[in-house]
Amino acid sequence: TPVYFTWKLFPEVYLNVVLLYLATDSLFQYFAVTQKSAGAAQNIALFFFGFVSMFNGVAPTPSAFPVWIRWGIWVSPTYYAMSNLVIRGFIQDGTKASEKITEDVGFRDDLAYGSINPPMTYILFVIYIATLKAATVYAMKNLKQAK
């Protein structure tokens, strides 16, 4: 049986995609302002982008990470977007087939899932974006290479 999101979840899926875009854009913008060249900014930004993408909460699930690096899921905006979509689309509003998939993969048994749900994830998204935007503005005002 195919597993898919229903159309009624489209606004929520769209909201998560837009928030993830804004968070990623804020990350790249911060490094663009703080580095002396575009190449240096891109290298550092891609390292951090790869790091937060690794902690997406889907593959692998948060409990699959070693204990010493699990903190990475809490600083990853990708995790918030994906966990919102998995919780809302496949667990809360899902079908029997999607419920079975989430159990087989281990989402239901993962302690990280369900411990933080919307609207708290949206608040964390806004904090992440606002913090990076504030750091970017500060860097533009105070760093020599940004002037």
Image (spheres, grey):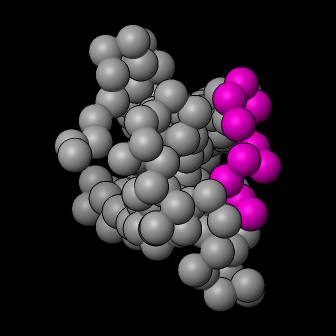
Residue drawn at (60%, 69%) of the image: 62
Location of residue 50 in the rendering, given as x and y in whole percent from the top left corner: 39, 66
Residue 90 inside the magenta-drawn segment? no
Residue drawn at (50%, 28%) of the image: 93
> Going by the image, does 80 lie left or right of 52?
right
The answer to whether one can see residue 99 in this image is: yes
Between 98 and 30, the one nearer to me in the picture:
98
Is 73 drawn above or below residue 95 in the view shown?
Answer: below
> Going by the image, does 43 lie left or right of 100?
left
> Going by the image, does 65 lie left or right of 33?
right
> Going by the image, does 15 lie left or right of 108?
left
Q: Which residues are magenta?
A: 111-120
Between 109 and 133, the one nearer to me in the picture:
109
Is 107 drawn above or below residue 134 in the view shown?
Answer: below
Residue drawn at (78%, 49%) of the image: 115
Location of residue 122 in the rendering, given as x and y in whole percent from the top left corner: 65, 28
Farthest-out residue, left: 2
Picture quadrant of residue 96: top left
For the stretch drawn in magenta, what is the main secondary structure?
A: loop
